[in-house]
Amino acid sequence: MSRIGNLVGGKSVDPTSGRFAPVFNPATGEQSAELGLSSVADVDLAVQAAKKAFPAWSTMAPLKRARFMFKFKELLEANADAVAAAISSEHGKTHSDALGEVQRGIEVVEFACGIPHLLAGEFSRNVGPAIDTYNDRQALGVVAGITPFNFPAMVPLWMYPVAIACGNTFVLKPSERDPSAAMLVAGFLLQAGLPEGVLNVVNGDKVAVDALLHHPDVKAVSFVGSTPIAQYIYATAAANGKRCQALGGAKNHMVVMPDADMEQAADALVSAGYGSAGERCMAISVAVPIGDKTADALVDLLLPRIQKLKVGPATDAQAEMGPLVTRQHKEKVLGYIDAGVKEGADLVVDGRGLSLQGYENGYFVGPTLFDRVTEDMSIYKEEIFGPVLSVVRARDYGHATKMINEHEYGNGTAIFTRDGDAARAFADSIEVGMVGINVPLPVPVAYHSFGGWKRSLFGDHSIYGMEGVRFYTRLKTVTSRWPTGIRSGVNLNFPSTN
Ligand code: NAD
């Protein structure tokens, strides 16, 4: 069994805490690796390595920093299959889905390749007599990233390519449930020749996270994970004077208007509801058809599509949906299905009790569909993060938008319609950060930015794209004149252009 440690100062280093966590293959339920959990001292070692690397890295020409990103991109492309295999073996998602995740991560690296242009400042000549002003954005120092299990390669790549290209040095704390893909990917950036200490990885749990949150040399924290932890990270980072963006959980609704292309809407719902076994923060977990006629037609179209889905391990090329990440998470999702039945929702497709030959100990739950879910039920209010799609029948468009706006989460949403007016009104007024119009998973591309509203994001900045550049830099504005321009003598009035 392999043992996974840390990457500090360009080298593999074993954590010293003597604490370990098992890593499992979710398709078989067997332990595949042992993860060393970092202590406060292990985290400090990584932060010190990053701090030492900062002066030279932050003053290197951005064009030179970008060249590491170009090499990193090439290595990721050449090794995409290996990264996808590492993702699938610990997360459980299918190989093709894992390849999609790697590709979306590479796209952020491509964005970071443009850093010289992205960091170009602004210059204003003659803001006063012979006075010029320019501004630029400077790196913060050592920044940390704490990432979730569900995109073990992509979410770290949302963070450090942009942070590092901006001139920061980085300490990553990946999810302890599936750390191998993050380690592999970080290794490729080191292989690209990155100076030691610019990127460090510490594995661990709350102890490592808290050490980062309280470390005086960590200037900013990026977090992606569940809402209670996001809120804790944001509050703790802010209390320690750190900049923080903390992305949290979701409950994404898809409104189906009576004029929608119903076949297209049903395809979209099944893809976005059950892809990656529903373990995506942009998964659609609530379908909101407008009126009973639309709802009946939609459920009739969903049923055969769901029944056809093939659940299996990632090693089965035919599988469309894999297992859940851990036994505990499987139990939690099954608990929600039980709760939905108890609360009175119609269980149209029951994913409980699924057992796959040869994979009886895997964490599989079949695709599940509830109809006639109401807003007071726990399966509506809470994030399930599994292959459970709820149909909430809305009386009319106003009812649909009210329920979305009143929900605690505001990550993503979609509307399916042929009516441009309705789509525009929806996009304008809905209180959600990312909106799809006939697009079920409106995950912004790398040169836009990703972020929800309400309790789906704590902090001011979305992640990657220009928002990422703004988060990982601070503005400096310089106003200058030269001695020949200073003719006015002493003047105690407040300077103005009058
Ligand atoms: P999680 O909150 O359990 O863990 C995320 C990270 O926080 C991990 O690195 C973990 O080690 C750390 N952590 C966990 N408990 C902690 C504690 N008590 N103190 C300090 N650190 C702690 O999330 P997860 O289960 O790995 O990921 C799934 C969640 O992430 C879902 O809620 C999903 O919606 C969310 N998510 C959100 C986005 C987004 O962009 N908004 C993207 C992906 C996932």
Image (spheres, grey):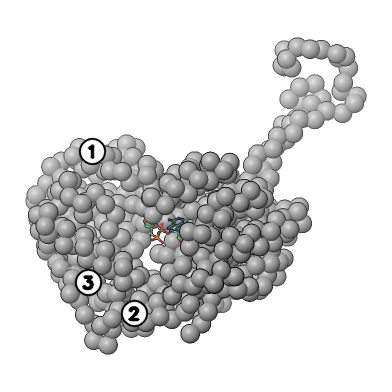
Q: Position of residue 271 (x, y in %)?
A: 28, 64
Name which quarter of the figure residue 225 lies in.
bottom left
Q: Amino acid at mark 3?
A: Gly
Q: Which residue is mark 2?
A: 29
User: In the image, which disc is placed on residue 45?
Assistant: none
For marks 2 and 1, give the CA distance: 42 Å
For marks 3 and 1, give the CA distance: 31 Å
Most distant residue in the bottom direction? 358
**Do the residues bearing badges 2 and 1 touch, measured as CB atoms within 8 Å?**
no
User: Label 1 neighbourhood size at 10 Å, few (<14), some (14-19), many (20+)?
Assistant: few
Q: Residue at x 52, y 54 (%)?
A: 210
Instruction: Tell me if residue 459 comes above or below residue 229 in the rendering.
Output: above
Q: Secondary structure at mark 3?
A: loop
Mark closest to the chain's N terminus, 3 or 2: 2
Mark closest to the chain's N terminus, 3 or 1: 3
Q: Report ligand 1 position as a quadrant.
A: bottom left
Disc 3 under 8 Å from ligand 1? The reply is no
Q: Which residue is mark 3?
A: 366
Disc 2 under 8 Å from ligand 1? The reply is no
356 with respect to 214 (left or right): left
Mark closest to the chain's N terminus, 2 or 1: 2
Q: Would residue 375 be seen by someone viewing this image from the given angle?
A: yes
Name which quarter of the figure residue 195 lies in.
bottom right
Q: Position of residue 86 (x, y in %)?
A: 47, 77
Q: Amino acid at mark 2?
A: Gly
Instruction: Tell me if residue 324 comes above or below residue 427 in the rendering.
Output: below
Q: Which residue is mark 1?
A: 402
Q: Residue at x 70, y 56 (%)?
A: 51
